[in-house]
Amino acid sequence: MKQKLIFTNLVGEAVDTLITELGNPQVAVVADTNTAQFVLPIMQKASKAVADATVITIKAGDANKNLDELTALWRHLSEMEATRKTVVVNLGGGVVSDLAGFAAATYKRGIRCINVPTTLLAAVDAAVGGKTGVNFNGLKNQIGAFSEPEAAIISTIFFNTLPEQELLSGYAEMLKHGLLESPQMLAKLLAYSPVYPVFNSEALLPLLKDSVMVKANIVDKDLKESSLRKALNLGHTVGHAIEAFAIKHQSPVAHGYAVAWGLVTELVLSHMVLDFPVETLRSFAEYVHTNYGAFPLTCKDYPELIAAMRQDKKNATPDAINFTLLAAVGEPKIDCTATIEQIEAALDIYRDLMHLD
Amino acid sequence: MKQKLIFTNLVGEAVDTLITELGNPQVAVVADTNTAQFVLPIMQKASKAVADATVITIKAGDANKNLDELTALWRHLSEMEATRKTVVVNLGGGVVSDLAGFAAATYKRGIRCINVPTTLLAAVDAAVGGKTGVNFNGLKNQIGAFSEPEAAIISTIFFNTLPEQELLSGYAEMLKHGLLESPQMLAKLLAYSPVYPVFNSEALLPLLKDSVMVKANIVDKDLKESSLRKALNLGHTVGHAIEAFAIKHQSPVAHGYAVAWGLVTELVLSHMVLDFPVETLRSFAEYVHTNYGAFPLTCKDYPELIAAMRQDKKNATPDAINFTLLAAVGEPKIDCTATIEQIEAALDIYRDLMHLD
């Protein structure tokens, strides 16, 4: 693995150690307008490297993950006379690491960067795996690169002030990793819940570590998503369809919530297509219902949802759509096929499991 | 090696064979305003894949290797609904392969491309080795990626209409490869000359093949220029300084001419520092003088030239500058050091070898 993963809540010390190991280069810290206000001051106290660094601030929010902000970042790097040895420290959520990670991957044909994710979703997803990029021409991540950071420092100290909904959103990706990995990991995750007052950042760190390693090991074998990495799409074909459907009907839902409901539906499909055990499906669905509630659906919504699933998949046929499914917990199978009838039946069962009429 | 190198003057057939091997994907041909007019019609007759392709035209010239043209290219790819399987065929010189190669490297995090260089300089340099990028903020290749094309089709059929100066400019890079490789290759190159009426495109092809393979083998071992690839800088520290000096004094010279004079000066340094054989130096200098003439210099110009060499090098000290030098033909040594006194003496000898006062 090229990318070094460091799990610690002593983030400032970890940054300083890394920067020393990298030869004490010039450092640029990229923050967004939120993390510049709330996280940067803490980090400037905790880390000499951050205190001494040039700070570049970008606008927060996915709408700003665009070419204008990218160009501004390139210009900042150029004007601070960043060299091939300069290291960029990305302090923020997925928007910061996607955007600044791509800027670093392409400035002088690639300089080093370190991800310091400040949200659970970024820690478990965007900060690891080297997918960088910006939205373009109305399409998400249309321009980008596969480029792994030098290191990611994964901590839970920044999560104490996150809204519960954001914690749950990130936790859905952890659940996905548990499903991909083993019954033991899934059991640990289902025994925990990132909601107050249960939530505390120390107890979350070991769970987060195990979860991040699942993704890191997969990415290590298939950085460019030729095959194995598609396993990480589990829950996302239905999840993305729910997200798009919700936006279209003017009631957007957080990404992780859509993934949680998508996981339930795709476990139903896994049962139908690959005989995934029904007891595990039931307990997983119950956990999702308790923590995430239910996304309301009626059978009238099916055609629109299925059309959205098809949009997400290049090699869907008129009669069937391909999915990543599970034969059992820890046994993903990529490029499975489900017919439209099976998908409709799975949505019926999803509604049943979610106690919807 | 990731990149496939095909040496043939049946370019149309080679493109069609490659596109078939790549699974008959959607094809986009990128040409500049010159090649769109003079080369594209020939290729459309010779290749079904090119005839059927979407054509994207960019503005010719290094001044247009910028973010605006890059964005236009991304937009074209997006609007033609290019997928991860689409193949981009770069039909042009270095500006086309640098710009469109970078667009391909970053569209949807990387799609495949094929270089079809139409100038000698591009065939021997830009088309091979995966350096892509654009100029930004007044600096050359400031934004880019190391990303090798799927293949390069190297031919000499497009060179018949090139001005002699352009042929000589490209040939200087071939001379450099000969110096890096072996006395045999160098002897062959010095026995030939890409000037009319000697020049014919068939005789050049085998020489070009040998020369391109020198670069390809080096890049294969060190794509990202950590060490070995620096050997390709031979002649370029002094060459870039001459180029910059000439621009500053309002009489710009072609890149390859500056490299030819740079090679002579750096062979003098090689003799002084590494005992490079003096007879080889003399015959090489004579070839350069005959074909490229002499860049006029007096000892009053030395401080300005040496300042420009320093600019080109990050780890120059006040007393010395680092170079790639040769112990003998075929024996490059990277990270050599020459003192300012040695460089001044070498420039004296350059003037002598070039019959300057």
Image (cartoon, coloured by chain):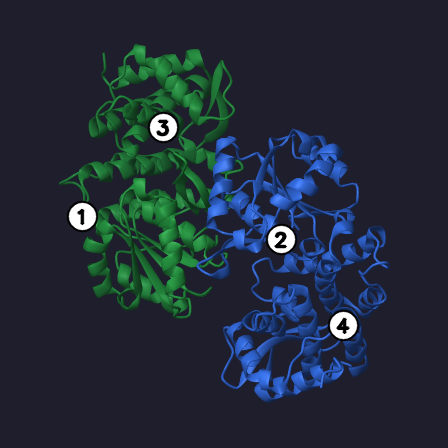
Chain colours: A green, B blue
Q: Residues within 10 Å of mark 1 (few under 14, many from 20)?
A: some
- The location of residue A156, given as percent across then percent down, is 25, 50
Chain for disc number 1 = A
Contact, CB < 8 Å: mark 1 with mark 2? no
Mark 4: which secondary structure?
Answer: helix
What is the CA distance from the residue labelled 3 to the residue labelled 4? 63 Å
What is the CA distance from the residue labelled 1 to the residue labelled 2? 52 Å
The answer to whether tags 1 and 4 share a subunit is no
- The location of residue A152, given as percent across then percent down, is 37, 54
Q: Which residue is mark 4?
A: B288
Q: Which residue is mark 2?
A: B94
Mark 2: which secondary structure?
Answer: helix
Q: Of the numbered discs in the image, which one, if any, rests on residue A240?
A: 3
* Vertical relation: A272 (above or below) A231: above
Of B226 and A198, the residue lying toward us: B226
Mark 3: which secondary structure?
Answer: helix
- Looking at the rendered structure, the kind of residue marked 2 is Gly
- Looking at the rendered structure, the kind of residue marked 1 is Asn
* Vertical relation: B166 (above or below) B39: below
Mark 1: which secondary structure?
Answer: helix
Q: Which residue is mark 1?
A: A160
Counting residues from the start of the chain, the first of labels 3 and 1 encountered is: 1
What is the CA distance from the residue labelled 2 to the residue labelled 4? 24 Å
